[in-house]
Image (spheres, rainbow, N blue to C red):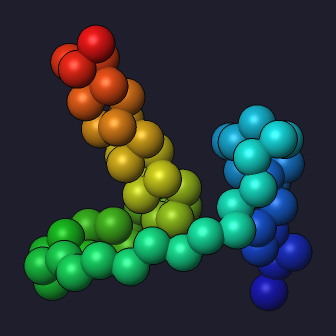
Amino acid sequence: MSGRKGKPENFDNPPSRDLTENVTFRATKEMKEAIQQQDNPAQFCRDAIQEKLDRNKQSEG
């Protein structure tokens, strides 16, 4: 087991942003399988969600 849990310096996050929150959502079996095939599934999900949030913010402003 790695010591990466919740430590931002172990992810692609700025040091000031702690990974303290959990998000749970439903997905299709195919989506879950595709996510699990990524090198780092958790970071892949964080990046995808952040990308969508950034796009939504740009279209609002």
Residue occupying the point 70% across, 42% down: 13
Q: Quadrant of the N terminus?
A: bottom right
Residue 38's x, y, as percent? 42, 61
Residue 58 visible: yes
Q: Is residue 6 above or below residue 49?
A: below
Residue 45's x, y, as percent? 42, 57
Q: Which of 38 and 45 is in front in this view?
A: 45
Q: In this view, does 50 lie above or below 46?
A: above
Number of callouts: 0
Residue farthest along the front direction in this orientation: 61
Residue 55 visible: no
Residue 22's x, y, as percent? 54, 75
Residue 40 image-quadrant placement: bottom right
Q: In which quarter of the image is the C terminus?
A: top left
Q: In this view, does 24 lie above or below 47?
A: below
Residue occupying the point 68% across, 42% down: 12
Residue farthest along the top direction in this orientation: 61
Residue occupying the point 32% across, 25% down: 57
Residue occupying the point 84% across, 48% down: 9
Q: In this view, does 59 lie to the left or right of 17?
A: left
Q: Is residue 12 left or right of residue 25?
A: right
Q: Is residue 7 left or right of residue 20?
A: right
Residue 25's x, y, as percent? 29, 77
Q: In this view, does 14 lie to the left or right of 41?
A: right
